[in-house]
Image (spheres, grey):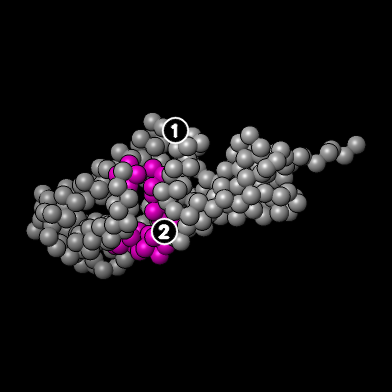
């Protein structure tokens, strides 16, 4: 006999992020799924980052969207799909492809413009400078999406939201300073501070809190896993910062 359709207790309520900078794709998937199943629901858009954070604190959840049926919290989009017996749609598998493309391109550019140079350190300088500039460019293409993803794990941004706004510009500044050797001492100190804070945040989120998150290193619209590669990227920034401080004129 065919199984009976799943009945959700009323009222069904959907809470999802809808800010000027970011429209949550999984929130949209939840809307489409509820509509396709003919389930009446209340749509509660969270229209500011502060509202999203307040909602997560209130309900003890790590992410949105969240769906409630009566007094029961069902969970996010995937939980809703499983509850309704529907195969959840995926927004793309996680991959390091974007990171590899950025660093591969940076390496090719560094080698191309460094032909005939005797010192390998200059090739490394150009590689890191170009890589940081490319990473900053990707973040600035959609700063709202970057901040949304970055805020989920970066400790300083969670305490001071303006850091998330400034981060891509600071990263671009460091990249250009590495390429031009402009103001090496202050920029080197800045790079060390940014790299250490970033590495600490990733280690805390992934290895202490055991969170399964995407990395914002190549912007907020990619499915790049947050983990060891993210730590390595931050430590590379620390290393270049040390090089700027120790060898400012090289």
Along the viewing direction, whichever of 63 and 200 lies nearer the viewer: 63
**Residue that mark 2 sits on:** 144
Magenta segment boundaries in residue numbering: 130-158
Left or right: where 190 falls relative to 38: left
Q: Residue at x 29, y 52 (%)?
A: 163
Left or right: where 192 falls relative to 56: left
Along the viewing direction, whichever of 77 and 113 lies nearer the viewer: 77
Q: Residues within 10 Å of mark 2 (few under 14, many from 20)?
A: many
Marks 1 and 2, the one that precedes in the sequence: 2
Chief secondary structure of the magenta portion: helix
Left or right: where 161 falls relative to 122: right
* Quadrant the C terminus occupies: bottom left
Q: Which residue is drawn at 12% across and 50% down?
A: 245
Work out which residue is located at the far left of the displayed protein and give it. Answer: 249
Left or right: where 35 falls relative to 140: right
**Quadrant assignment, res 159:** top left
> Residue 208: percent from the left, percent from the top?
38, 31
> Residue 67: percent from the left, percent from the top?
61, 43
Q: Residues within 10 Å of mark 1 (few under 14, many from 20)?
A: few
SS state under label 2: helix
Along the viewing direction, whichever of 169 and 30 lies nearer the viewer: 30
SS state under label 1: loop
Q: Which of marks 1 and 2 is in front?
A: 2
The count of marks equals 2
**Residue that mark 1 sits on:** 210
Please tell me whether residue 209 belongs to the stretch shown in magenta: no
Instruction: Please say if 181 is above or below 15.
Output: below
Q: Residue at x 72, y 45 (%)?
A: 86
> Residue 49: percent from the left, percent from the top?
42, 51
């Amino acid at each position: 006999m065919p199984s009976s359709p799943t009945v959700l207790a009323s009222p069904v309520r959907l809470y999802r992020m809808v800010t000027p900078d970011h429209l949550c794709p999984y929130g949209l998937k939840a809307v489409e799924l509820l509509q396709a199943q003919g389930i009446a629901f209340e749509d509660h858009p969270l229209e500011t980052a502060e509202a999203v954070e307040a909602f997560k604190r209130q309900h003890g959840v790590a992410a949105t969207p969240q769906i409630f049926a009566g007094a029961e919290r069902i969970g996010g989009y995937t939980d809703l799909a499983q509850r309704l017996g529907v195969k959840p749609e995926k927004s793309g598998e996680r991959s390091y492809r974007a990171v590899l493309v950025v660093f591969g391109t940076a390496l090719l550019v560094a080698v191309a413009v460094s032909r005939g140079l005797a010192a390998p350190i200059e090739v490394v300088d150009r590689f890191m400078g170009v890589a940081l500039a490319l990473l900053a460019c990707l973040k600035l293409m959609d700063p709202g999406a970057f901040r949304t993803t970055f805020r989920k794990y970066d400790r300083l941004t969670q305490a001071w939201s303006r850091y998330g706004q400034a981060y891509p510009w600071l990263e671009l500044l460091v990249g250009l300073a590495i390429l031009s050797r402009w103001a090496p001492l202050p920029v080197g100190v800045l790079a060390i501070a940014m790299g250490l804070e970033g590495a600490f945040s990733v280690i805390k989120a992934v290895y202490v809190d055991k969170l399964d998150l995407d990395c914002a290193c190549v912007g907020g619209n990619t499915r790049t896993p947050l983990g060891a590669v993210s730590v390595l990227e931050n430590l590379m920034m620390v290393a270049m910062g040390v090089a700027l401080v120790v060898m400012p004129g090289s």
